[in-house]
Image (tube, rainbow, N blue to C red):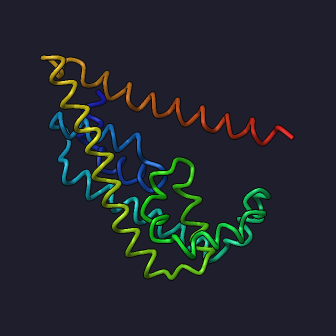
Amino acid sequence: MITAFIASYGYLAIFIGTLLEGETILIAAGFAAHRGLLSLPTVILVAIAGAILGDELAFLLGRWKGEALIARFPSLAKQKSRIHAFLERYDLLFILIVRFLYGLRIAGPVILGSSPVPLLRFTALNLIGAFMWAMLISGAGYAFGLAISSLITDVKRIEAIVLIVILSLGAVFWVWQRSRARMKKKQP
């Protein structure tokens, strides 16, 4: 059932998933590519497209409403001048690695959009960062498939279970992070 879903909607799921966070879905897609359910080059291209579009939209949102969004988060608002000073010195590094920093995948480009970083510079570096991210994360899923195949001779029998476990672990991690963030907000 899940393998039929992946064959039918896998690339669409990758695109939608990478518009937002996307690591879990991209690891699962890399594993599915190893299993022959998807094409690894297409997985990478779709992930790059989704990641770039999501980050560009978040950057433009930061340009349009960045000040108001930052003001809604008092701890971030207090650090705004320090963050912008950091970005003036290290924007290249930050743009390249922001998608690897959990929790900053959407907030990072919004913050960058509210800073003086030029759109063209962000777009060029965002393309490079998206390429690195898509290659590494989908490659990790593919490598995981190789490792499982070396340990288990009949992976076909359990590939649906492995995909469900990958996606479930990602969902559990996401819920855990969200609940942890809520608990921190409630603490004085």
Q: Residue 44's x, y, as percent?
A: 26, 54
**Residue at the extreme left:** 153
Q: Residue 100's x, y, as percent?
A: 45, 51
Residue nearest the observer in this picture, 46 or 127: 127
Q: Residue 66's x, y, as percent?
A: 67, 71
Q: Is residue 168 left or right of residue 113?
A: left
Residue nearest the observer in this picture, 15 or 131: 131
Above or below, 81 against 184 in this view is below
Above or below, 153 against 187 in this view is above
Instruction: Give the quadrant of residue 115.
Output: bottom right
Quadrant containing the N terminus in the rendered view: top left
* Residue for point 72% across, 60% down: 76
So how many labels did they put on this image? 0
Q: Residue 137's x, y, as percent?
A: 33, 46
Above or below, 164 against 80 in this view is above
Quadrant containing the C terminus in the rendered view: top right
Q: Is residue 89 left or right of residue 66?
A: left
* Residue for point 46% across, 56% down: 99
Residue nearest the observer in this picture, 162 or 79: 79
Instruction: Give the quadrant of residue 59.
Output: bottom right
* Residue for point 28% across, 25% down: 160
**Residue at the extreme right:** 188
* Residue for point 52% across, 29% down: 172
